[in-house]
Image: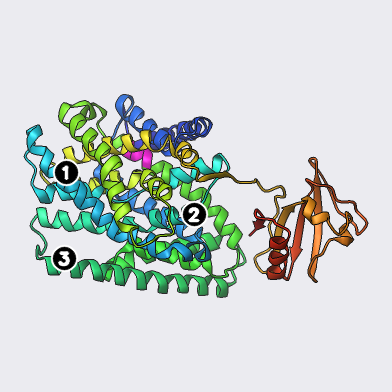
Amino acid sequence: MFEFSGENFVLVGSVLLFVAVMAGKVAHRFGAPALLLFLGVGMLFGWEFISFNSPELTQFVGMIALCIILFSGGMDTQFKDIRPILAPGLLLATIGVIMTAFILAFFIWLVAPWLNFAISFPASLLLAATMSSTDSASVFSILRSKKQGLRENLRPMLELESGSNDPMAYMLTLLMISVLSHTGNTGIGFNVLYVVVQLLVGALSGYLIGRAAVWSINKINLENTSLYSVLLLAFIFCSFALTDLLHGNGYLAVYISGLVVGNYHIVQKRTLSIFFDGFTWLMQIVMFLMLGLLVNTRELFEPEVLIMGGLVGFFLILFARPLSVFLCLLPFRKFSTKARLYISWVGLRGAVPILFATYPLVANLEGGPLLFNVVFLSTIISLLIQGTTVSGMANLLGLAYEEREATFDVKLHDDISSALTEVEVKESMLAAGSTLKEISLPEHTLVMMICRDGAYFVPQGNTQLLVGDVLLVISDRSEELESIYRELGFNEVHKHH
C-alpha cells in the first residue's frame, strides 16, 4: 500500500485526478452526480492502495476548496436573477438550516436509546448541524448536461440557497463543538449574539472586500492578463482570513465577495470566469478525493454506522428537509406545491457535511469517528437516491423544460455594452414580409448572421428568411428589442453574455 507522501505524491495525485475525470465522464453519461464518483474513487484508492489518515490536512484543503467553490458560485450568480426569490432563498439558507438541524437532532436523540447508543442532545445537534446545509453543485451539472431548465424560478432559488447556507451550518457546527468541549459560553443569549455578529461582520466584510477587488482589478492595469486571476485569488483568501480574524463568518464573506465581483463591471471578466470555472472543478475533485481517502471504508459496514447512518439519511430526505422547506415557504404563496416538493427533494448533501464532520475529529471529541462515519454514509445515501433522480423528479412534477442550446458560440468584449441575442424565426415574424429588410427591428440593431440547417452565412437586406432560421442579433436598444420579441410571441430568447 502506498503512503500518501514523499516522492510518489505527484504520481499518485496525477493518477487520482485522471481516474476522477474519467469517472466524471461516466457520471455524465448515466446522469449520476459526478462528485459521487469522485468520492467513490477516493474510497476505492483509500481501501486498497493509499494509506491516508490526516483530518487536519483534509480540513485545511477542504477550507481552501470551499472558499474557491463559494466565491465561484457567487461570481456566477446574477443579482437580477435572484432578486425575485431573495427572501425565500435567504430564509431557507438561515432559518431553514436551523430548523433542519433541530428536527434531525430531535430524531437522533429520540431514536438513539432504542439502538443502544448513548448520545446527548448537544451531541445529536452537532451531528445534525454538520448535515444541515445543501450542496446543489451536482444537481445543476446534471440539469445542464441534459439541457433541462426549471420553472417557477427554481434554479436561481436553489443556487442562492446552496451557495449561502454553508455559513450557517458552519457556525452551528463550531458552536456545538465549543459547547461539547466546554470551551465556549453555553448561554442562549450569548450564542444568539455570536450568530448575529458572525453574519453581520461576514456580510459587511465580504461586500467591502468585494468592492475593493473590483476597484483594484479595474485600476491596476496589468500587462500580463494572467495575473488578474492571481490577484483575485489573493482577495478570496483575504476575504476569508481577515473576516475570521474580525470574528465574522469567513465563508459568508467569500460568497458575498463573489456576488459583488460577479455583478460589477470588471476588466478581463471572461478570462477570470473561465479560469475559476476550471479551478472550481479541480477544487471539488481534490476535496472529494481527499474525503474519500480519509474515510475507513471498513468502518462504514459496522452495524452501528449502517443503522444510524441509514436512519439519519432517510429521515433527512423524507422528513427533516421537507418539513423545514414547507414551514419556511409558508409565507410565499407564489410557489406551487410541486415546486415545494422539488425544493425539498433536491436538498442534496455533498462534500460540505463530510468536511464539517472532520471538525469533531480534529477537536478530539468523544464519538468523533462515529459521527464522521455516520455523516459520510448519510451523504452517500443522499447522493445515490436524490442525486440520481434530480432530472426524473423535475419531469415527474412537470417543472422541467428543455433548454435550447446556443447556436452561435460568440462572446462580446467586456467593454461592449450592446446586447447579443439569438432567436429562431417563426411564422409570426414573417407576417409583414419574408425578407430581412421587411422585419421590424429597432434602430441600431443588426442581424449579424443566420444559421440555416447547420450552415452559417452573413445576410443582406433582400435575404429570404425561412421558418426555423436562427438569427444572431446585436443591438444597442436591448429594451426595445425585447419588447418586439414579446410582441412576436418569442418566449425563449437566448442571450449571450
Q: Can residue 235 be seen in this view?
A: no
**Vertical side of 488 occupied by 26: above or below:** above
Disc 3 is placed on an element classified as helix
- Residue sitting farthest toward the right: 462
Disc 1 is placed on an element classified as helix
For the point 18% across and 27% down, the residue is 302
Residue nearer the viewer, 38 or 77: 77
Q: Where is residue 307 in the image (x, y as percent from the top left)?
A: 18, 30
Magenta segment: 288-292
Tag 2 and tag 1, C-beta contact below 8 Å: no
Q: How crowded is mark 1: few (under 14 residues within 10 Å), some or many (20 or more)?
A: some
For the point 21% across and 35% down, the residue is 311
Q: How crowded is mark 2: few (under 14 residues within 10 Å), some or many (20 or more)?
A: some
Answer with the quarter of the image where residue 273 lies.
bottom right
Separation of residues labelled 2 and 1 (CA atoms): 32 Å
Could you tell me the amino acid type at mark 3?
A: Asn
Disc 2 is placed on an element classified as loop
The disc at residue 107 is 1
Q: Mark 2 points at which residue?
A: 152
Q: Name the residue under label 3.
A: 191
Q: How is the image coloured?
A: rainbow
Could you tell me the amino acid type at mark 1?
A: Phe
